[in-house]
Amino acid sequence: KPNPKIKNLLEKYKEIGNKKLNNIVCVSDILLDGSRPKVRAMDTNLSNLLTDAIRWKVNADISLQNGGGIRSSLNKGKITIRDILTVLPFGNTLYVINLKGSIIKSILDFAAKIPAGKGAYLHTSGLTWTSENGIPKNILIGGKKLDLNKVYKVVTNNYLASGGDGYKILDKFKSNGYDTGFTEASVLREFMQNELNGKISSYPNKSRYIRK
């Protein structure tokens, strides 16, 4: 039989944990769309929010996020820690890598060929681009044309940095960077609280990647 003292102690910690998970992070007037069909095929307000948050945390030039890492939407109303962990359940951490523009172009060469519906579908912040017939075009970083010889500060998650979802080129250059230890979930929470002041009235869903 379970030791009643241990059982009571575990129940106490479980109660404390549940209370923390129910802490309100933010209040949103809108649905933040993280639905599987959307985030694996197009930019949404939630994918834009997440990529903006991780870029903000480390002051990177650009951020890269796979659609498959976004697992749920955030409904209109009160957003709790539990809700954020439902969106980002994997515990992925921010990984910073310094990459030349030519390497970023190679990453986009790969991303441009990913069909809609795949978890590898790429979301970005600080970077806008177009693909036509699987070829990247109109690549802008910070509103300026990509410089193939310039070194940019890039942030992604540790899953992609390790070559996940087919991004082997990131794994190849992983040694040019470091794992920050910051989880995506904690960074999104921090961004909502500190940069958005705990209130979301609207958030842009404008496409940063246009496929033709």
Image: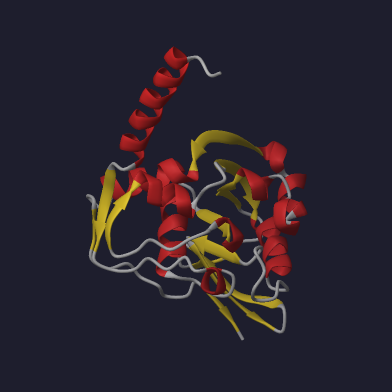
- Against 109, residue 55 (above or below) is above
In percent of the image, x 45 and y 42: which residue is there?
Answer: 58
- Against 15, residue 148 (above or below) is below
**For this rendering, which residue is in front, 212 or 7?**
7
- Against 59, residue 181 (above or below) is above
Seen in the image, is 137 located left or right of residue 124? right
Residue 56 can be seen in this image = no
**For this rendering, which residue is in front, 12 or 185?**
12
**In the figure, residue 201 lies in which quadrant?**
bottom left
Seen in the image, is 193 located left or right of residue 87? left
The percent coordinates of residue 142 (x first, y second) are 46, 62
Seen in the image, is 168 located left or right of residue 31? right
In which quadrant is the N terminus drawn? top right
The percent coordinates of residue 115 (x first, y second) are 70, 75
Instruction: Tell which residue pokes out farthest to the front in this image.
Output: 1
Figure disc tally? 0
**For this rendering, which residue is in front, 109 or 99?**
109
**For this rendering, which residue is in front, 179 or 147?**
179
The percent coordinates of residue 37 (x first, y second) are 56, 74
Seen in the image, is 20 located left or right of residue 118? left
In percent of the image, x 74 and y 46: which residue is there?
Answer: 171
The percent coordinates of residue 75 (x first, y second) are 34, 64
In which quadrant is the C terminus drawn? bottom right
In percent of the image, x 77 and y 46: which residue is there?
Answer: 172
In percent of the image, x 48 and y 48: which residue is there?
Answer: 60
